[in-house]
Image (cartoon, rainbow, N blue to C red):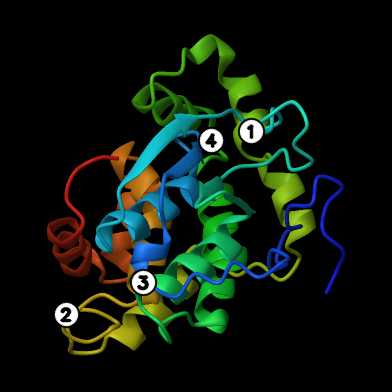
Amino acid sequence: GKMPLPDGTNAEKEDPTPPLGWTSAEDLKDVKLYGFKASPPVAKIAVILKYYGVNFDFVKLSPGSGVTAKSSYKKIPVLTASGRTVNDSYVISKHILQACAPGSFDPAVEEEITFGLQPALEVECLKSGAELKTYALAFGVIPSIVPSFLVGMMSPSASIRKKHPDLKPALEYGKNFRAKIGTQPFAGGSEPACADLSYYGTIYTFIFAKCPTAVAHLKDADLEDWYKRMQEKVPGDF
């Protein structure tokens, strides 16, 4: 593994050192989720925490600022719990799931959602100015500052594509996921699993903002009924 960041917290995709030692939901105390409500990876973590009944405080944090002046990690989300700080949505979801539902974290699924579905949705939903404006307004961002809001929150389409050269169309990830569900209510069977929570959390902000591309994604991938079932399992905003 890579070394921790200068402030001792974990780099992206790296586990925190020393190990967190979280083995049950009871190990997660004084939980704070730092981020921006319009950020898909922040929403994903909120959904996982809510589903497992972990109480948390949401602390508004813009990308680029860091939790404290000394923080080495400047992206969102960041989670603090039980005196520890965890960076990166992939790593955060892994450790919450290991504590709340041991054995349920699926690295292949989580990687496909974090590094496939999420950037694919960002590219497709936010490439048009009109859709971007809709998205920003849904989260109370004034349209005149939309360009700086976009740069702060997500990389514009071209740079996302450059970072993820093997990116497939979002619909392909959707159809793969739909195949995992099969005839069951959820990919996890009768109850949501890691894949359901992450997929739902990732697309949630786009649906909340009524982005036409995301609404079409659910329809074309035949995920509308699944999405309604997930809304019942994880009700309300965060």
Q: Which residue is mark 2?
A: 185
Q: Which residue is mark 1?
A: 67
Verify CB contact (< 8 Å) between mark 1 and mark 2: no
The C terminus is located in which quarter?
top left
Q: Residue at image x 39%, y 75%? A: 195
Question: Which one is closest to the eye, mark 4 or mark 1?
Answer: 1
Give the image location of residue 198, x and y in percent: 41, 65
Mark 1–mark 2 Cα distance, whole angstroms, equals 38 Å
Q: Which residue is mark 4?
A: 128
Please name the amino acid that badge 1 sits on.
Val
Q: Which residue is mark 3?
A: 100
Displayed quadrant of residue 202 = bottom left
Q: Earlier in the sequence, mark 3 or mark 4?
A: 3
Badge 1 marks a residue whose secondary structure is loop
How busy is the neighbourhood of tag 3: few (under 14 within 10 Å), some, or many (20 plus)? many
Please name the amino acid that badge 3 sits on.
Cys
